[in-house]
Amino acid sequence: MNFDLTASMMCANYGNLEKEVRDLEEGGIDSFHIDIMDGRYVPNYAMSLNDMRYIASVAGKPLDVHLMVEHPNNTIELFTKELRKGDTVYIHPEAEYHPSTTLQKIINAGMEPGIAINPGTSVETIMEMLRIVKKVLVMTVNPGNAGQMYMPYVGKKITKLLSLKEEMHFRLYWDGACSADKILEFAPRGVDGFVLGTTLLFGKNRSYGEILKGIRELRF
């Protein structure tokens, strides 16, 4: 069964970030998830533009940049000019007055446009944007902090989005509290990728290659 695995780099060891990137790539990671937080849209600060720029400079695999910032339309060019063609940029539709304008800027820059959907955001409120984006990132926890508990009611939202994937032509990704049992349940149903953080990938005293191999060999 094919599904993407992306590393949540806010959980990485910043004592030797280049080694983390190299080890993850050698271990078989598909992409690097970059969480940018402004302390306003979410009550936390996480990775910075400089962090993203550095990872983009040393990584061979794509970047998935998740902008948890207010009014990303005002600063979107700061991010897109540092990325490579084909990298993904997610915005939160609630963070912008006219999110489709911001998505068009991402498209014009040659990036993959995506939206991130909070647990409290209904599918109905973002229906038209599903026709624009290439990826949908479903937050199964409230955004802003690593290590939170999964919110079970998000499963019904994922079911609804899965029913729209073929018609709307988007790929669906899981972000938050991603455990092996969630991959076992939702990958066969059509979720295309999973963001891996402290639950499965980081801080386990095992090589990334061993961990990622184990995930891909789960018995479905």
Image (tube, helix red, strand yellow):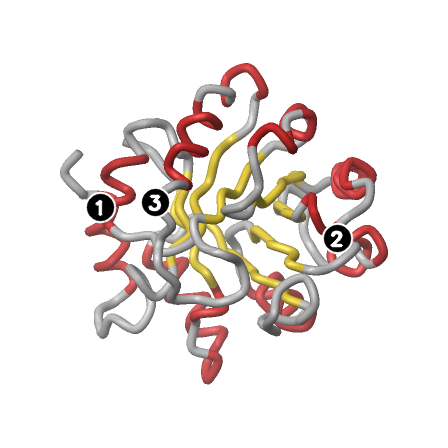
Across and down, in percent, residue 80 comes to 75, 53
35, above or below 105, in the image:
below
| CA distance for labels 3 and 2 | 34 Å
Q: Left or right: where does residue 152 sit relative to residue 37?
A: left
Q: Residue at x 38, y 50 (%)?
A: 151
65 or 15, nearer to the observer: 65
Locate the N terminus by quadrant. Answer: top left
Q: Residue at x 19, y 43 (%)?
A: 217
Q: Quadrant of residue 27?
A: bottom left
Callout 3: SS: loop
Residue 181's mark? 1
24, above or below 61, in the image:
below
Residue farthest left in this picture: 219
Callout 1: SS: helix
Across and down, in percent, residue 43 comes to 61, 70
- Within 10 Å of disc 1 (Cα), the crowding (few <14, some 14-19, many 20+) is few
Viewer-nearest of discs 1 and 3: 3
Which residue corresponds to mark 3? 152
Q: Residue at x 24, y 58 (%)?
A: 211
145 or 108, nearer to the observer: 145
Residue farthest right in this picture: 74
Q: How many marks?
A: 3
183, above or below 126, in the image:
below
- Within 10 Å of disc 3 (Cα), the crowding (few <14, some 14-19, many 20+) is few
* Amino acid on which disc 2 is placed: Thr
Residue 166's mark? none
Which residue corresponds to mark 2? 80
Viewer-nearest of discs 3 and 2: 3
* Amino acid on which disc 3 is placed: Pro
Which of marks 3 and 1 precedes in the sequence? 3
